[in-house]
C-alpha cells in the first residue's frame, strides 16, 4: 500500500460544478497536511494547508479526517483556471525525509 | 525576489556522462531539497539539506550526490548518468522546520538520458 494515495483521475467536470477528491494516508501519526497545485509542465505551488478543524479559502475547502486517515479538497463553482493536477502532501514525521507526496489527481474543467 | 531558480531547464545526456544541476534561492531559507518526478508517481526526495554544509539522504539517493557549500545554493550531481535517471528534477526550499512550512519550488529541470 502506498503511503499517500490519490485517485489519479482525470476528473472532467463542467464549469461551475462542485468537485471533491480525497487523499488517504497510511501513517496515523502524520502531523501536517497540505494540498499543492501543479499546472502542466510547471512546478508545484502550495494551494492550502489542511487544519484539524477544516479550513476554507474562497472556493476551496480542505478537511482532515484523522479517524479514517484521509484529507479532502472541495472546489465550489469551478473555473476553467482550476484545471490542474492537485497533489496531496503529508508530513509523516519530524524529518524532511518523511514529507510524502501523492501522485496527484488531475482535474479538467470544461466550458 | 527571484525565489527558487534552477539551471539548466533542459538537458540531454548520454549514458555514463556526468552533470551538475544548480539550485539557487534568494529567500534566506535554511532547508533545501531535491526531488524527482516521474509519470504516475509523486515527487520523491533524493537528498536534502538542513543548513549550509549539511546534507542528508532522502528516499532515492542512489546515483546522486549533493553539496551545500553556500546557504543559497544546493547542487545535485549525477556522476554516471543512467536511463533510469530520466526525469523532471525539482528543487525546493523552506524557511523553517521541515514539514510545517511551505515548500517553494523551482521551475524544474527536464533531464533525458539516452
Image (cartoon, grey):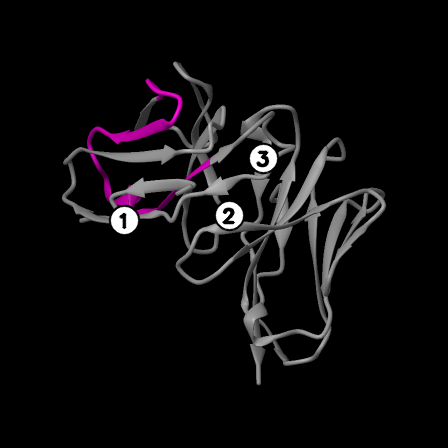
The chain holding disc 2 is B
* Distance CA(mark 1)–CA(mark 3): 25 Å
Q: Nearer the viewer, mark 1 or mark 3?
A: 1
Q: Secondary structure at mark 1?
A: loop
Q: Name which quarter of the figure residue B83 lies in.
A: top left
In the picture, the disc for residue A99 is: 3
Q: Which residue is mark 1?
A: B9
The chain holding disc 1 is B
Q: Secondary structure at mark 2?
A: loop
* Distance CA(mark 2)–CA(mark 3): 11 Å
Is B48 left or right of A75, judged from the image as shown? Answer: left
State whether residue B74 appears in this view: yes
Q: Nearer the viewer, mark 2 or mark 1?
A: 1
Q: Secondary structure at mark 3?
A: strand
State whether residue A61 appears in this view: no
Q: Name which quarter of the figure residue A52 lies in.
A: top right
Q: Which residue is mark 2?
A: B42
Is A38 left or right of A35, judged from the image as shown? Answer: left
* Distance CA(mark 2)–CA(mark 1): 20 Å
Q: Residues within 10 Å of mark 1 (few under 14, many from 20)?
A: some
Q: Position of residue B13 (x, y in %)?
A: 16, 44
The chain holding disc 3 is A
Quarter in which the N terminus of chain B is drawn? top left
Is A81 left or right of B11, judged from the image as shown? Answer: right
Q: Which stretch is magenta?
A: B68-92
Is A85 colored magenta in this rendering?
no
- Compared with B111, A61 (above or below) is below
Q: Position of residue A44 (x, y in %)?
A: 50, 50
Mark 2 and mark 1 lie on one chain; the one further toward the N terminus is 1
Q: Name which quarter of the figure residue A34 lies in.
A: top right
The reply to whether discs 2 and 3 touch (Cβ–Cβ < 8 Å) is no
Residue B42 or B53: which is nearer the viewer? B53
Amino acid at each position: 500500500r502506498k503511503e499517500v494515495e490519490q485517485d489519479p483521475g482525470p476528473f472532467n467536470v463542467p464549469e461551475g460544478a462542485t468537485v471533491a477528491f480525497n487523499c488517504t494516508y497510511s501513517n496515523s501519526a502524520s502531523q501536517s497536511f497540505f494540498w499543492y497545485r501543479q499546472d502542466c509542465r510547471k512546478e508545484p505551488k502550495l494551494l492550502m494547508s489542511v487544519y484539524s478543524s477544516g479550513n476554507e479559502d474562497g472556493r476551496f475547502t480542505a478537511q482532515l479526517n484523522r479517524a479514517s486517515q484521509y484529507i479532502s479538497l472541495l472546489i465550489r463553482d469551478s473555473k476553467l483556471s482550476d484545471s490542474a493536477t492537485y497533489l496531496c502532501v503529508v508530513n509523516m514525521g519530524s524529518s524532511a525525509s518523511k514529507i510524502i507526496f501523492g501522485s496527484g489527481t488531475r482535474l479538467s474543467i470544461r466550458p | 525576489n527571484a525565489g527558487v531558480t534552477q539551471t539548466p531547464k533542459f538537458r540531454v545526456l548520454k549514458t555514463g556522462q556526468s552533470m551538475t544541476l544548480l539550485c539557487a534561492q534568494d529567500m534566506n531559507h535554511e532547508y533545501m531539497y531535491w526531488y524527482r518526478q516521474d509519470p504516475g508517481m509523486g515527487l520523491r526526495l533524493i537528498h536534502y539539506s538542513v543548513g549550509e554544509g549539511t546534507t542528508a539522504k532522502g528516499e532515492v539517493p542512489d546515483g546522486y550526490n549533493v553539496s551545500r557549500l553556500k546557504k543559497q545554493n544546493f547542487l545535485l550531481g549525477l556522476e554516471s548518468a543512467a536511463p533510469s535517471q530520466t526525469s523532471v528534477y525539482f528543487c525546493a526550499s523552506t524557511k523553517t522546520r521541515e514539514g510545517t512550512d511551505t515548500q517553494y519550488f523551482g521551475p524544474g529541470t527536464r533531464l533525458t538520458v539516452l
